[in-house]
Image (cartoon, helix red, strand yellow):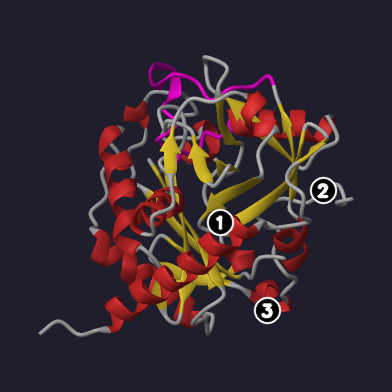
Amino acid sequence: MIELGQTTHDAEADARNDDLLIYVNGEIVHKDAAKVSVYDSGFMLGDGMWEGMRLYDGCWAFFDEHMDRLFNSLKSVSLEIDMGPADIRDILNRTAAANGMTGDAHCRLMITRGRKAKPFQHPSLSRFGPTIVAIVEHSKPAENVQAKGIRLATVPQVRGLPTSQDAKFNSHSKLNCVIACLQAEQAGADEALMLDPHGFVNTTNACNFFIVRRGEVWTSTGDYCMNGVTRQKVIDLCRENDIPVREKNYSLYEAYGADEAFLTGTFGAQTPVAEIDGKVIGSTSGAGPMTLRLRALYKALVAADVAAQKTPLI
């Protein structure tokens, strides 16, 4: 059985993170000195966007895709920054270099509407420019989670309609996911399996969700879940390697009877699911054969992306 308290973002302990240097609004400072105002709109209202990226051999994997999502989100909520993707890359590279990192590192880049003049909601009160923070940690996914998998519990909290809060926004406002995670923990699981507004299987509180049935890879339609970069890479890999893949509505009935299930995310790549609502998934402990195949294909894809970034333009 899996110990309670695991998450898809568990990392191996690394003492170097005790003296981490963090980028905060143009400065790189020790983590103990990395602070933002209590008037910051991100702290006060969850008014901001973030991206998670991994560093491999000195390069940020699938950087362009992450920037597409980030800048689309910022534009959608009228959060303007006087920077482009190249400036963001420079921030991340300088922060990683300050910490002596070339790989096995994970970044959380956070951009909020900035400090407010008064502690109220209206966006016009954010008058001092955006807040930009980059935390880059030495971070290697915990082997026990990758080997044994995650236990999920279906929860009442759902990912809602785009007209309430579009799940495509990787926003600081994650309360619905936090509630879902709490509901799952209180049910004795590690994380939550969230349904869509129509009751179909959707996503987890932290990652995108896939199942494998009779040699086919299934995931949700994508209408109500985060447009995950890793999610899309897995779908693309299936199509490129003649693996049947379906983006479709399906119920818990199909999920319970799956041969395999796994989660996708930038941090853990492909993390196996061991149980859903107490029901063991598959006949093998840990990652099944399809998950292992996709994990290998994804690893090769990351290597190809890194190599392409290192190849000088002629």
> Which amino acid lies under the numbered mark 3 shown in the image of this protein?
Arg
The percent coordinates of residue 304 (x first, y second) are 35, 75
The number of numbered discs placed on residues in the rendered structure image is 3
Residues in magenta, as a range: 156-175
> Which of the two labelled residues, at mark 2 and mark 1, occupies the earlier sequence position?
2
**Residue ranking furthest to the left:** 314
Indicate the amino acid at tag 1.
Answer: Lys
Tag 3 or tag 2, which sits nearer the N-term?
Answer: 2
Find numbered disc 2 in the image and state the secondary structure of the residue it sits on. loop
Going 45% across and 82% down the picture, which residue do you hit? 57
| In this view, the mark in front (2 or 1) | 2
- State how far apart marks 2 and 3 are (Cα): 23 Å
Q: Nearer the viewer, residue 263 or 9?
A: 263
Instruction: Please give the label number shown on residue 16.
Output: 3
Residue behind mark 2: 5
Tell me the tag on residue 35.
1
Q: Is residue 218 left or right of residue 81?
A: right
Quadrant in which the C terminus is drawn:
bottom left
Q: Quadrant of residue 175?
A: top right
In terms of depth relative to the viewer, which is nearer, 255 or 224? 255
Q: Where is residue 132 in the image (x, y as percent from the top left)?
A: 41, 55
The reply to whether the magenta stretch includes residue 168 is: yes
Residue at 59 percent of width and 23 percent of height? 251
Which of disc 1 and disc 3 is earlier in sequence? 3
Measure the alpha-carbon separation of dots 2 and 1.
28 Å
Q: Which amino acid does label 2 sit on?
A: Gly
Q: Is residue 115 shown to the viewer in this render?
A: no
